[in-house]
Amino acid sequence: IRISRFERTFGETPISAIGRNQINDWILGLAVGPQTKVNFRRVLSNLFAYASRAGIIQTNPVRDTANVKVRRKKTEILSPEEVAILLAHCTTETLPSVLLMVFCGIRVGEVSRLEWQEIDWEDSTIEITAEKAKREVHARHVTIPSNAVDWLRPIAKRRGAIVSFETRHTFTKALQDVRAQAGWQPGEWPCLLYTSD
């Protein structure tokens, strides 16, 4: 996906003619957050490293591009008004995942791997196994607040993935659309969304 975006700009240019400055300007000019720019740089470095190993170019110009600094955001708590705006812009497909991220603090990558049967409706908890978590080595149980349960129950399914999108990319794009419609600009999205109100 990232390489295809790069190709839209440089697709007609031989890879040997693409220099450090062009790559650097392109990455820095992307209307995305710092971490996403780092991700683009990593993917492009892999592409140019392959071209170097294949003898198509002599050196990897991406190695000499600027390293984008990523400053970790402090945890932010959305106000009830912000949550209301966010939920109002959710689609049927994005609402369950956004509810779990906002009310339970579950990460995007985790929620994309969860299934409906992992919710215990009697205890109002959801199990996140070690395989589905980002950093934990043990399973953890997250309490789902009663207001989130009230939102989730009418739309819950008996089984299957909570995130119904075919690919992680389409899921991420759908979340970006919800954020944009709710008024957040690229790079302004809080790193953790949680409200107990």
Image (cartoon, rainbow, N blue to C red):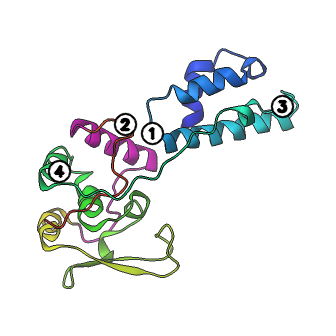
Q: Sequence order check: which comes first, mark 3 or mark 1?
A: 1
Point out the stretch of residues depicted in magenta: 157-183
Q: x, y (%) of residue 43?
A: 64, 40
Disc ID at residue 186: 2
Q: Is residue 3 magenta?
A: no
Q: Is residue 167 visible?
A: no
Q: Are marks 4 and 2 in contact (CB under 8 Å)?
A: no
Q: Earlier in the sequence, mark 1 or mark 2?
A: 1
Mark 4 or mark 2: name the one nearer the start of the chain.
4
Please, what is the three-letter code of the amino acid marked with disc 1? Gly
Q: Are marks 1 and 2 in contact (CB under 8 Å)?
A: yes
- Please indicate whether residue 195 sits to the left or right of residue 142 in the image: left
Q: Give amino acid for label 2.
A: Pro
Label 3 SS: loop
Residue 178 among those drawn in magenta: yes
> How far apart are the two marked residues, 3 and 2, measured between alpha carbons?
33 Å
- Which residue matches tag 3? 59
Residue 196 in percent (x, y) is at 18, 67
User: Looking at the image, is mark 3 or mark 4 earlier in the sequence?
Assistant: 3
Q: Amino acid at mark 3?
A: Thr
The residue labelled by disc 4 is 87
- Spot occupied by residue 106 in the image (x, y as percentages of width and height): 35, 65
